[in-house]
Image (tube, rainbow, N blue to C red):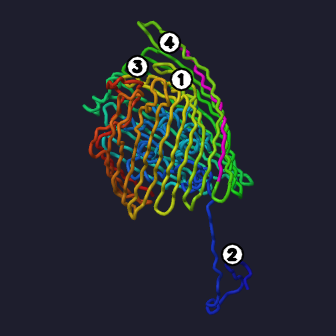
Amino acid sequence: MCRKTILGLCAVSSVWLSPAQADHVELAETAINAEQQRDPTAPSIAEKKAEFSHIPGGATVVDAETYKSGRSSTLQDALGMATGVFIQPRFGAEEARLSIRGSGLQRTFHGRGLLLMQDGAPVNLADGSFDFQTIEPLATDHIEVLRGANAWRYGATTLGGGINFVSPTGKSAAPLDLRYEGGSFGYHRLFGAVAQDFGDADAYLSINDYAQDGFRDHSKQDNQRYFANIGGRINERLATRVYLTHVETDSELPGNLTKAQMRRDPEQASADALRGDQHRDFNLNRVGNITTLQLDGGHSLELASFYSEKALFHPIFQVLDINSEDYGMRLSHLWESDSGWRWRGGVEASQGRNWDSRYVNVSGRKGRKVNELHQTARNLNAFGELEVPLAERWALIGGAAWLHQERNVDDRFKCNAFVTAVCVPQDESFDGSYLGRLGRIGVRHDLAEGVQLFANFSQSYEPPTFSELTGGQITTQNDAQKANTWEAGLRWARDSLDVDLAVYRSEIRDELLALNDANGQPLGTVNADRTLHQGVELGGAWTLGQITLRGQYLFNDFRFDNDDVYGDNRLAGVPRHFLKGEALWQQDGWYAGPTVEWVPNHYNVDQAETLYAEGYAIWGLKGGYRPGEGVGFFVEGRNLSDKTYVATTGVIANANGQDSAQFMPGDGRALYVGLEWRQ
């Protein structure tokens, strides 16, 4: 007789069993299941992929392990093979042309047209602009890429959508991670991270120091990034996580070259860059928070908030000395029923202030003050999406968004130029409001296990950033950019094949197009009347035995639509075809194989289609050993044929067939090595 049970096992008290009796005692088998409660502030890759499978459009999750097999320095290293993402560094460092579906098409610095986030909270400043140096690719667990209106769940209403960099936590990261990268052009990177799981809470801390001389003259980089997060479950319903970021970044700018200069010596810097000792240096402090509350009936609330301050020193055609302060929050309500209905909606508010002082550039130092602008951006947005199951394997998704944004510029100097020491007055004060009402509808069909078809129609609305309003060589007061977008595609994730395919067409009004002068300096931004962006996004991976093929192909057909000046010309600055990929043999942590990047055709640098950048093909090799823990290494060669090629370009209205300083050469032949120890 059993008088007491402990964990399902019989415990006998006051009775001792003899060995003979013990031979006949049979204990019941007991299975003890202990499942760790998930942390809603830190979703896993598998959870995000399952969530994204409900989106009727382009949405991809990039596992950071796929790019940490080689040099992991820039956002191009991290996002270069992410479906639908076009990203090309302008000087082999962080700043780049980053575009999805032609968003922010002609900006190669201080980006726009996308919502960049870190752990769900915006990295963008309140006016919509963002800096590439804020993100540390090595301190990233995975990256969410939501193209177009598929990023509405984060309140993004831009043409390009949103990119969310999700950090490791004390539960998901290795307790200790030490990594060194080094190689060509004086490149060195030291990275260290520690993680600790305390049970209900956890913490993660990373420190990164990176420097390089650069392929070109006057292109040194010196960056330090410190990142930490701490959080977890407070109780069964409430969870919170706090994120801290500190960035110190100094970047020399080598400027743009003419085509003749690039062919003669791609390593040289432009005369303007040297004369003005052009730099982009800033310090950034940022704090973010994600808090979630689980309610009854499948309901939950999520609060994302952030505060950041930035100090920028930026000698270019003038010395820009800008101090920024930005803060905001987004409250989202999520609901999921047992019958398959899903809702996600919310409101967000943000505000940013810039103290923008301008000076004559005297060899990279401040000369006479020529301008002072106090800029304020205010945003109040509301958004929502509802998924309705129509029939078995079919679902309809409808959404709406409303946004009210303000841009205010107070010109405190009212003098942006001098002629023989006499002020030429120009008041750049501006006070504008932008109101958008948008809709979205889509349908999703689960054709088979792991196979989905989707189609949707959506609208986008983008007020200009301060860079598109004031402070350039030409002052402009632009309207918001608006677009209607149709999209259809396929997701396939079964067996050894993973495919992400989307075809889209965006009809745009008042597209914000940035232009340069003949020397490659920013001239200003204008609204085009009507433009058309359409194309194909194809990406994925295919495993054949021990060989994995991974990459993406983009078809970019971006053009004016019966423009009074440019007719149906192609928009300048982006190639029509772009392919990037790798083929890696992999076994037990070992890997090796070639990499390739191919632009098969030339593409125009001016809107009038009289000046072109040539197509190119570059290739490389990489290999190494990357275990789950212990010591690993990599060796990577890039552009091994030492091809002189145009990585990206500036944009000019009409070159009249003449050479112009718009070309930014890519890095020459390079070799990188890395050593990592994960405990």
**CA gap, disc 2 and disc 4:** 84 Å
Question: For residue 442: magenta?
Answer: no
Task: Give the labeled residue for mark 2.
Answer: 6
Position in image of residue 245 (x %, y %): 52, 40
- How would you rate the neighbour count of disc 4 (Cα within 10 Å): few for under 14, some for 14-19, many for 20 or more? some
Q: Name the residue under label 3.
A: 361
Going by the numbered disc 4, the residue's amino acid type is Cys
Query: Residue 255: in sight, yes or no?
Result: no
Query: Label 3 near label 4: C-beta < 8 Å?
Result: no
Q: Earlier in the sequence, mark 4 or mark 3?
A: 3
Q: What stretch is highlighted in magenta?
A: 395-414
Q: In which quadrant of the rendered image does the C terminus lie? A: bottom left
Which labelled disc corresponds to residue 415?
Answer: 4
Observer-side mark, 4 or 1, equals 1
Which residue is label 1 attached to? 469
Q: Which amino acid does label 1 sit on?
A: Leu
Q: How far apart are marks 4 and 3 (CA)?
A: 16 Å
User: Which mark is nearer the camera, 2 or 4?
Assistant: 4
Whole-percent x, y for residue 347 in the image: 68, 38
